[in-house]
Image (cartoon, rainbow, N blue to C red):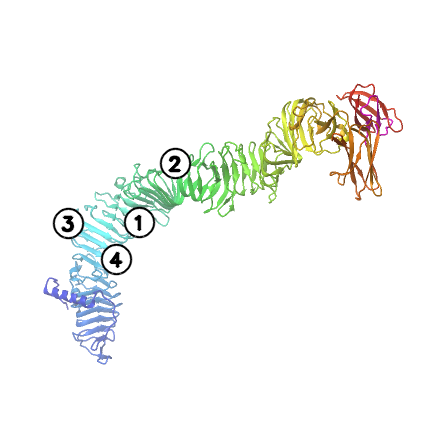
Amino acid sequence: MKIQVTRNRSSAAFHVWMLVWAFSIFRCGSVLAQTTTPTYVPGDYRTATSGMLGQAGGTALLEQLTADNTWASVAYPIPANATVYVRHAVQIENTLEVDKLIVSTQQTTITSSAALIANSTLSVSAGATLLMQGDIHVKGTLKVEANAKLVIKSASYQGLSTLWAGIEQLDPASEVRLEEVAPKAVLFSPAALTTQTNGFLLGKLTIAFSSGNTQWQLVDGSATLASSAVSFMIPSSSSLTLAPANSQISFGQGLALAGGTFYGQNQVNGTVSIAVGQDLQLTSNAVLQLNQTASSTAITLFDLKGNLLLDNTSSIINSAAVNTSSSGIKLSGTDWQTLNTAGPINHVSLTVKTGSKARLANNLSLNSSNSVYAGTVTVENGASLDFGADAAGNGYAVTGQGYFKADLGSTLYITSAQGINATGTMGNVQVTDTRRTFNQLATFVYSGLVPQQTGNVFTTTGSGKIVVIDNPTSVTLTNSINITSNTTLAADGGRLEIRQGKFIGTATADVTGTGKLVMRGGVYQVQVVNVQVPQLTGTHDITAGTVELAGNGTQTLKGGTYPAVIISGNNTLGTSAKTISSTTTITQNLTILPNAILDASTKSLKGDGGLTMTGGTLRLARTTATLPELTGNNNPYSLTGGTIEFYGSLNGQYQSIRGTYGASKKITYHHLQLNAAQANTTDGGSNIQSSANFDVAGTLTLNAPAVFQVASNRTIAGTGNFMVLPGATLLYGSPQGIKTSGTGTLDGNIRVSGTRTFSSEANYGFIGASEMVSGNGLPATVVNLLVSKTGSGVTLTNSVAVTGTFTLKSGTFKTDSKELYMVNSSTSAVVVADPTFYIQGNLRRAIATTGTYQFPIGTATGKRMLELTSNELTGNGFQNILVGFNPLISHQDSDMLLEENGYYYTSMQPDGVWTLEPNALPASGSYTAVASLQGFSNLTDNQFALLVRPKTSVSGKDWRTGGGMLEGPNKDGRTVSSGYAKRAFMTQFGQLGIANATAGTLPVSWLYVTGKRTQHETVIEWATATEKNNDRFEVQYSLDGKTFTNAGTVKAAGNSNTIQKYRLFHTLSADQITYYRIKQIDTDGAFELSKVISVNGSKTTQLVQLSLYPNPTHEELFVHGLTLATNAKVEIYNATGQKVQVFHFEADSRVPKLKVDHLPSGTYSLHLQQEGITHRLRFVKQ
């Protein structure tokens, strides 16, 4: 039967309904349906089986709860005031009126000919279904619990059905499903429905119609319709109008449309707004037409909070006459909204509202054909549109004949490989050129997954735009971008922000302007040359990422702080380079690639970053600093290629090579080039020094005029090479010096395992506070040689020739048996910083024909300065003279027979002699010798002079004047106060010593000194031929031949011209060799020493002293101490060295005699030759 009910909420019945609804709110506190557990009371009915259920009878068995709370079978009829629990699948036939009907489980069907009247409650429990094919009249409460379903499949159903006559409690998770209704019916009348506490009328709503060629209307007024998902499925030939005129419809969650045509409205005027809380989805040939009526004044707006999903069989359209600027779909969600529109959208605008974000999941086809009111995709101020990309990274595009408009303040996420363009058919926006509008005061985010171009979207006029690089691969500038500090978009102005990937400027395109640079990652590669980069002049806020200077030419990195910097591109040394404008700090890493040059010049390039070089060049000219300044605390030094060049320092300036990074980890350099603008020759200075030990894998090259200092505790090791080139200076101080090979701890300053090249045209120096040797790596020839030791010295490993200057600034320089050869004949080639400094050992100097040459030499006991003046020395290949100072050996003062200018030379200063050894005897010329008296004692004015004897001489008889001349008495060179002894115009070389002289006749002429050991004592005997003013003899003995002690004194004859014999007995218990000498002392205290004899046990050693007497003589001379052979030859020379006569002795058995009465008065030298030995004796003819 049909239940006819008049629904008029303005009538008395409506007021009764409102009272009941209000009472239910007061009683229940909520009108939302809730799942409840049945509470049975006696008298309640329930089904015991499935079947037919009716008022008067049926096939479904019934039970009733008795007073004792037990269930008992009961027969029909069912009273109209009964409470019935349907616990099985039943079909209600005819009319069933009850007070309450609760569908507990399964499905209860109101058949098409039946009617259900619920006077108080009709409830559908969770999991149960109520199928309405007939009529339902709810006079009280209709309750549908969560997961319960109310299915309407009634050909007579309309929105004003008595189903909605009471009060509804519809759980948000409950479902109302419409499968069949009356043709052209209004499906819901909001005025007849109860608003739930969540503000909606329904929970889940499903429409699944099968009737074709039919049109329905969803509601007849504004409605907040369904809080849960809504799904409308109708045949393709049917349609459903969603809203009446001037209404607002709201769907709490998604709206899915399938099959037929769905109209937003069908009006000439007015505005309809349809809100979709989640996705709007069209599938299966669905068509959404905003207005069924072609009107330019009616407005239809969809307010979409979720995704717009349109399969390729469906479409969203509107009439060509509709004003698309006011109608369309507004995307207003708070999270990203996906636009997956495989089908076309015609004459419908899509607007991403302020605060919302949309993302394409497919190409968006907007108006495939041209029209006046083509649709527009608009991104409003504060809104974002992400163009999205497919799995291969191909960015989606907005295509067609529609419009695209990015408003001021909008944000575009650009994904196309071609970027976004104002013109052309490439990129994310491909609508007609004239229909594209890109406000430059917007945010452009490049977020593709494949390498991108920026596109030609940017105008040449600067603006406060924001450009963001968020592509993990790369983005390349198509044209330059001008970003200003305009604050319209952001309080700190426009900016370029790089988050990830590589942002590539080209040789002709870069980002300029007064805007800000922000980096949170990625790489900013700049290729524009002859500019300061980054070119943005605003604040640089760089907390991560890399700036890369990649131009093929000169680029200047703006000073500041950078996490990482890469230097690439091509540069030519001396022509172009990358530079920095001012102090630059790198916190993570500096990378230099092959063919690139970074020239930091004198600017500071510092920070805790590391350094990576696979090639290229890093040039550093900053002084008074350890370079590179990067500490490597945050990243290591990885120098597998490339060159670091130190250059530019002047005299007085230095640079220090870093040896370690991070936690004292040793640096391995590849190539090092050490250069300077001027050599730093300051005391203790150098152009370049090492701050710590380091390794070299390539080659360290020291170039002119740089001075490189390697301290005593510094080493350079590794597998590379070490080269000192001509003109450079190497200062080193290792105790082992520099060596030609060896990599161990005792192998000197340079320990590389590769090639070591120490140029002979370079300069070298010795430094540091430890004793050292020069090492066999010091070339045999160098240009300049410096000694600058502190409290220590250096010893030559090999002899060295210096072609420039030898400088002794401090410390000692020892040659040992080697020699220092000054090839430079300049008199100033030897520079001694302090008068007390000298060379311990041998100095050879090149001698020119003129000039005064100093030989600041000496021994460990002190300095023995000698100065030689060349007086036209030349010829016979003569080039140089070697000078040393050596002990006086093989000399007996008593052998001396030389007289000069009335002075007799009686002894040599025992401290030592200079040796003068020319490379070849000069053919002509002479020299003047000036010898320092430092270290000599017991000298008397005018009674000392320089004498010379052959280098190999072992006799005191060989001392000569060397053909030289003395200054006059009391002149400099003759007085002790002058500090030196001088002899001019000498021609003889060899041993040069200082002799003591006595004026007038010789005090004693020795005949012999003998010694013999007896059982208890030693007998010392001696004899003299003549004596003058002789006071006494002191006999001295020594056990080591060096230190003598007085053994006794014997009174002398005083004055005598006859032979005087003396004897001394010396008691000594020592059973070893004992040395004796006799000290002859004059009455005025002057003295001379005899030869030294040795006595060993009972064996007597007699050293007979060959002598002439009387001496001086008038007529004849006797030779004592030698038996002449038959072939003996005697030659007499005058004081000038001229041979004056050859004699043969008239010999007797003991003392040969020589007639000299015919000789002029003067001093003569007698040379007696026999058996290959020449004896030289001196005498005076009166």
Q: CA distance from mark 3 to mark 1?
A: 33 Å
Crowdedness of circle 4 by 10 Å Cα count: few (<14), some, many (20+)?
Answer: many
Residue in view at x 31 percent, y 39 percent: 484
Q: Which residues are magenta?
A: 1105-1127
Residue placed most toward the observer, 927 or 895: 895
Q: Which label's residue is closer to the chain start, 1 or 4?
A: 4
Q: Dot 2 corresponds to which residue?
A: 532
Q: Which label's residue is closer to the chain start, 2 or 4?
A: 4
- The answer to whether 378 appears left or right of 1118 in the picture is left
Q: Dot 3 corresponds to which residue?
A: 269
Q: Looking at the rendered structure, which numbered label has been put on residue 106? A: none
Q: Which label's residue is closer to the chain start, 2 or 1?
A: 1
Q: Dot 1 corresponds to which residue?
A: 360
* Residue type highlighted by circle 3: Asn
Q: Do callouts 4 and 3 mark residues in contact (Cβ within 8 Å)?
A: no
- The answer to whether 1040 appears left or right of 827 in the picture is right
Q: Nearer the viewer, mark 4 or mark 3?
A: 4
Q: Which label's residue is closer to the chain start, 2 or 3?
A: 3
Helix, strand, or loop for circle 1?
A: strand
Q: Which label's residue is closer to the chain start, 4 or 3?
A: 4
Q: Dot 4 corresponds to which residue?
A: 253
